[in-house]
Image (cartoon, rainbow, N blue to C red):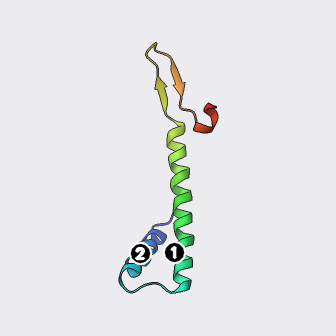
C-alpha cells in the first residue's frame, strides 16, 4: 500500500476523533481500511507460507492452513 494512503487513513482517523467525518469521508475511510487489510493479510500469508516446523524426530513439515488440516 502506498505511504500516502496510509497517511490518509491516519488523517481520517484523527479527524474522526476530533471533529467527525462527512459521509463521503466515512466511505473513503472504509475503502482505504479494506485495501490496507487486504494487503496486510496477503503479506502475512506470504510470510507464513515460508514457515517450516521441525518435529521432535527431526522431520520438517510446512505450516498448514487451518482449512487444510481437516
Q: Which residue lies at the image location 45% right of the left edge and 68% below the top edge? A: 6
Mark nearer the N terminus (1 vs 2): 2
Label 2 crowd (10 A; few <14 / some 14-19 / many >=20): some
Q: Is residue 42 above or below residue 11?
A: above
- Residue that lies at the very extreme toward the top in this rendered image: 57
Question: Number of marks in the image?
Answer: 2
Relative side of 14 to 57, left or right: left
Q: Secondary structure at mark 1?
A: helix
Q: Residue at x 50, y 47 (%)?
A: 44
Provide residue 46's location: percent of width, then percent of height.
Answer: 54, 44
Q: Position of residue 5 (x, y in %)?
A: 49, 71
* Location of residue 12 (image quadrant): bottom left
Identify the image quadrant of the C terminus. Answer: top right
**In the image, is residue 30 above or below residue 69?**
below
Q: Which residue is mark 1?
A: 29
Which residue is label 2 attached to?
A: 13
Relative image position of residue 54 (x, y in whole percent) = 45, 22
In contact (CB < 8 Å): disc 1 and disc 2? yes
Dot 2 falls on a residue whose secondary structure is: helix
Amino acid at each position: 500500500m502506498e505511504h500516502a494512503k496510509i497517511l490518509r487513513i491516519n488523517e481520517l482517523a484523527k479527524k474522526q476523533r476530533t471533529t467527525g467525518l462527512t459521509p463521503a469521508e466515512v466511505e473513503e475511510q472504509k475503502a482505504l481500511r479494506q485495501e490496507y487489510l487486504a494487503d496486510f493479510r496477503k503479506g502475512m500469508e506470504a510470510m507464513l507460507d515460508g514457515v517450516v516446523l521441525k518435529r521432535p524426530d527431526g522431520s520438517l513439515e510446512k505450516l498448514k492452513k487451518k482449512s487444510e488440516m481437516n
